[in-house]
Image: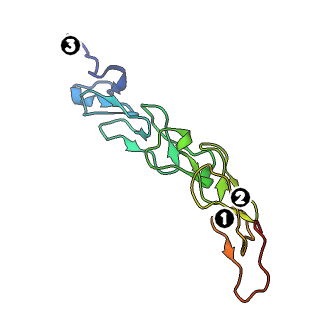
Amino acid sequence: GTVCVTCPAGVFSNSPPGSVEVDACLCNAGYTGPDGGQCTACLPGEFKGINGSSSCVLCAAGEYLNTSAGTACDGCPSGNLSNSLPGSDAVTDCLCLPGYTGPDGGLCVACELGSYKGINGSSACEKCEAGTYLTESGRSVCTVCPSGNRSTSLAGS
């Protein structure tokens, strides 16, 4: 009688019941390789959500994955208030956007009225300089006071 043979990549691939060809052995989600061949794990920062020979894909901007063999990426903790580069492999790659501050990979909060932050990251918000102002929180630049105006704003207005 005929004996069933285990797929070559062991636990990283699978075939449907009744398969008669080694090419039916497909890499599991989180692994990539040719049908019927050796499967390798997707690296941190990339994923593969389906079985088969398709390639691993980089996590999108605003996402990260800190483990290998991933099937999906995680979103940055502060949602649309932070961002990361495609292929990020650590939560600390999630940086607060301009106008927001907080620890890398942590909760981002808006700069207060009269202060701004013009870059991504964990740097502190800065007070608007004299002659400039802000009427909203979470901004990346201060507005210059209108010309012809006799008064000047104080720093942090």
Q: Which mark is residue 2?
A: 3
Element at badge 2? Answer: loop
- Please identify, in this view, whether the residue under mark 3 or under mark 2 is nearer the observer: 2
Q: Quadrant of the C terminus?
A: bottom right
Residue farthest top in this picture: 1
**Mark 2 / mark 1, whichever is N-terminal:** 2
Mark 1 touches mark 3? (CB < 8 Å)? no
Mark 2 touches mark 1? (CB < 8 Å)? yes
User: Residue tagged by mark 2?
Assistant: 111
| Residue 21 drawn above or below residue 125 | above
Q: Which mark is residue 44?
A: none
Residue type pointed to by label 2: Cys
Q: Disc 2 to disc 1, how far (Cα)?
A: 7 Å
Q: Disc 1 to disc 3, how far (Cα)?
A: 71 Å
Residue type pointed to by label 3: Thr
Residue type pointed to by label 1: Arg
Task: Give the image quarter of residue 3.
Answer: top left
Give the image location of residue 84, x and y in percent: 51, 49
- Please identify, in this view, whether the residue under mark 1 or under mark 3 is nearer the observer: 1
**17 relative to 83 in the view: left or right:** left
Give the image location of residue 145, x and y in percent: 71, 79
Residue at 72%, 75% in the rendered image: 131
Graded by Cα atoms within 10 Å as few (under 14), some (14 to 19) or many (20 or more), the crowding at tag 2 reads many
**Mark 3 / mark 2, whichever is N-terminal:** 3
Give the image location of residue 59, x and y in percent: 45, 45
Q: What colour-coding does the image apply?
A: rainbow
Element at badge 1? Answer: loop
**Mark 1 / mark 3, whichever is N-terminal:** 3
User: Residue tagged by mark 1?
Assistant: 139
Q: Quadrant of the N terminus?
A: top left
